[in-house]
Every structure is written in structure tokens, then in C-alpha cells.
Amino acid sequence: MRHATYLLIFSSLLSCISCRNDYSPKPRGYFNIVLPEKSYQEYKSNCPFIFDYARYAKVLPDDSQGTEPCWLNIVYPEFNGKIHLSYQPISSRKVFNELIEDSRTFAFKHTVKATGINEARIAYPEKKVYGIYYTIDGNTASSVQFFLTDSTKHYLRGALYFDEVPRIDSIKPVLDFVKKDIDVFVKSFRWK
């Protein structure tokens, strides 16, 4: 009994001494991501456009149900992401206006989760490439969307997706890295 009393007093003192420092939890850790060196190559096919894409990515035909010719995916296997590209020929002014409105609608569907959506105009008159680049901030399924057109015959829409739960703080380094690849894609893009 005497030993039990000493043990109880010792345990009480030990718990009082050990609880003097404030405890603060450590922040959540994330994997270290090693990004490859930037390098680009040209993509040519039977489709009516040419562009540069990253050497560490693959350009594959879109094999989803209901796809059309010249629908492609620029796949980033290392990052578990892709840029989905869908090409449409423009047959009339009405079709052109519908495609532009669809692009805007797809971008603004992310308003529920987005903290902001920015639009930037794309214009390369010497190549007849025009469009809008949407940057979507926040925990959204797609952080970048854009469309490119010559305003008369061709229209191409692009959207970046990661096959991960959208947590902007964890994908931000890769997102910033891939955004630079999209910038190269847009600047190098030209119609045949």
C-alpha cells in the first residue's frame, strides 16, 4: 500500500512537470516533388494544328466514349494529370458563338469551389490564333482552361485536370510547373 501511494504521488508530479510546455501540432507534410528539366518537342499529325509540348508528357488520342477526330490528351504520367484538347471545325457563325459560350460555361461551372476566375485574352494575329485563357483559383477540378480559334474555320478547347482530390496547397508546385508548359503550348500553337 505504501508503494502504491508513492507511485501515485510520483505519477502525479511527473504529469505536472511534463505538461509545462505548450504543445503545438506540426503542419501536415507533403511529398517532395522532383520536377523534370523543361524541354519541348513539336507535335504534328493529320489534325489541322501544330504545337509544342513537354518531352516528359505524352500526346495520346482521347479514347473516351463519344470523342471525335483530333480530340487529344497531353498526359503527364509523372504528375497524374492531363490537358484535354477537343477540336471542332467551325461551320457557321452560330456554331462559333455556341462554342465560345460553351467554353465560358465550362470554366464558370467551377464557381462553386473557385475562389476566383481570371480571364486573359490570347491574340497572335500573325498566326491567326485568338482565344481566352481562364485561370481558376481554389480547390477545383480544373485550374486552367482555354480555347484557341482562327475565328472562321477552327476551334480548339483545352482543360487541365489532375486525377487527384483537388487540394490546391498540395498540387500548387506541379500546377505552376504545368502552367508554364501550357504557356509554351499556346505561344507555339498554329493552324495548318
Image: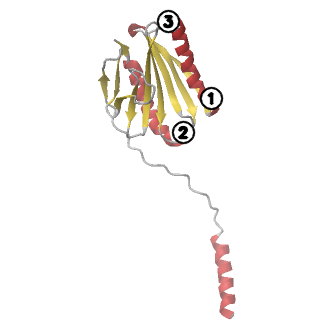
Residue neighbourhood size for the residue with mark 2, other residues' Cα within 10 Å, grouped as few (<14), some (14–19), many (≥20): some
Element type at marker 3?
loop
Closer to viewer: mark 1 or mark 2: 1
- Residue bearing the label numbered 3: 92
* Residue found at x 59% / y 30%: 110
Single out the mark in the foreground, 1 or 3. 3
In this rendering, position of residue 100 left or right of residue 82: right
**Marks 1 and 3, the one that precedes in the sequence:** 3
Q: What residue type is labelled 2?
A: Ile
Instruction: Please name the residue that numbered disc 1 is placed on.
Output: 111
Q: Is residue 89 above or below residue 23?
A: above
> In whole angstroms, how far apart are the C-alphas of marks 1 and 3?
30 Å
Report the amino acid beneath label 3: Ser
Q: Tell me which residue sits at (64%, 62%) in the image.
A: 22
**Marks 2 and 3: in contact by CB < 8 Å?**
no
134 sits to left or right of 153: right
Q: What residue type is labelled 1?
A: Thr
Q: Which residue lies furthest to the front in this view?
A: 65
| Up-down relation of residue 15 to residue 163 (above or below) | below
The x, y position of residue 150, in whole percent, is 44, 9
Helix or strand or loop: what does disc 1 sit on?
Answer: helix
Question: Which one is earlier in the sequence, the residue at label 1 or at label 2?
Answer: 1
Q: Which mark is residue 168?
A: 2
Q: Residue 40: x, y in percent?
A: 32, 27
* Front-most of residues 38 and 6: 38
